[in-house]
Image (cartoon, rainbow, N blue to C red):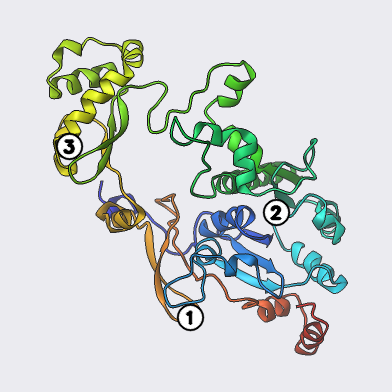
Amino acid sequence: MKKEEFFRHARQDRKGPLDGMVVVEATTTWAGPMVACLLADYGARVIKIEHPTGDVIRRLPPLLPNSSLSVLDQTVNRNKECLTLDLHHPKAKEIFLQLTTKADVVVENFKPGTMASWGVGYEDVKAVKPDVVYISISAFGQFGEHSDRPGYDPIAQNYTGWTSLNGDPDGDPVKAPTFLGDDLAGIHGALGALAALRHRDISGEGQHVDVSLVDSLLYHCNGQLTCGALGLEQPRLGNQFGMAAPVDNYACKDGNVLAGVLLDSHWVELAKLLGREDLSDLKIPDRLQRRDELNDILAAWCAARTVAEVETILMAKNLIVTKVNDFRDTAKETHIHDRDMLQDLKLTDGSEVPITNSANKFSRTPTNIRSHAPSIGEHTDSILSELGYGASEMKLFKEDKVI
């Protein structure tokens, strides 16, 4: 299908499927901002509440070339507005609660109890906006033995046991190179918001949605928590798979490929290519038992060829294979640009940078990156004006360091 055909019925009068939704975000770093990023990408108006000194993510590396702007900040805070508030200040609490009366969703990711201590927790917001959907993201959740423990993404990865399966079979457990727990919690936070809004639209009832990094990681561990509860063996396999063989990362003359088979019919085709028809009748259980032997055969076949040769030969037989890319390679891939996964965006410092785009494609209500990550307090005056505050009041707020 051509891209033009997929989007042939696209509307041009909507920012996305969530156009009209209002989200108030009081978050820091990644998991909470990712909830709001997804909702903003889908067209919602997101107002990010930020301490006047700025979220720490603004200072975290990597920085853009010849710039003080953080890649992380530009990635997760695009399509948002920024209002600075010091929520320790009573007046800031008043402004926050006034703002939430106009919101569909509130998102926060502070340690449980923090927002309530500032007077802007779920019960406080519910008192002024009874049907609010209030999303709380934390490491261990709002209740449970460890709910009061602080925690970040690597803590969740190691606490859950996820790292125990990651890395070289003969090495130590290894964390994911990306913020996996944060990202999964962000996705569940956004999905939870939409589910709760569906209930609100039917019943008129809002609710508090509790999302933890630990729960989110465990949900996406492919049943490994059940295996652990039953005492089943859970070996670390590196690039191999427990249910398929041969599959691995194989060295070629000029790089590496990830290749292999799962289905028995695919193994028949691969055995022919390897010149080992004598092994073509091996079924999945047989191949798992002879994993090392089959891996050695496929490794030797790949080692005698270039990456391009291996890809061409295997793809001609509809067998799975890919060059093992780094992100510099991937950023050059035509397919990535065909899918609009990089969008050039003009940032606050005037530079134009390719920013990772939204994953979902909506044929009727397409989305894109509409605006750069805002500078600190970029929209403070305009948002306060919407709430009815005048210039003299804003001047006092600044003098009192409310904003």
Whether pointer 2 and pointer 3 mark residues with C-beta atoms closer than 8 Å, the reply is: no
Q: Is residue 337 above or below residue 217?
A: below
Task: Tell me which amino acid carries mark 3.
Answer: Val
Instruction: Kindly identify which residue carries mark 3.
Output: 310
Badge 2 amino acid: Asn
Under circle 3, the secondary element is helix
Q: Residue 352, image x and y in percent? A: 39, 75
Badge 2 is on which residue? 109
Residue sitting at 60 percent across and 56 percent down? 30
**Element at badge 2?**
loop
Is 345 located above or below residue 282 in the figure?
below
**Left or right: 346 as drawn, with respect to 143:** left
Q: Is residue 52 above or below residue 268?
A: below
Q: Residue at x 66, y 79 (%)?
A: 382
Crowding around mark 3 (Cα neighbors within 10 Å: few <14, some 14 to 19, many 20+) is many
Q: Which residue is mark 1?
A: 349
Q: CA distance from mark 2 to mark 3?
A: 46 Å
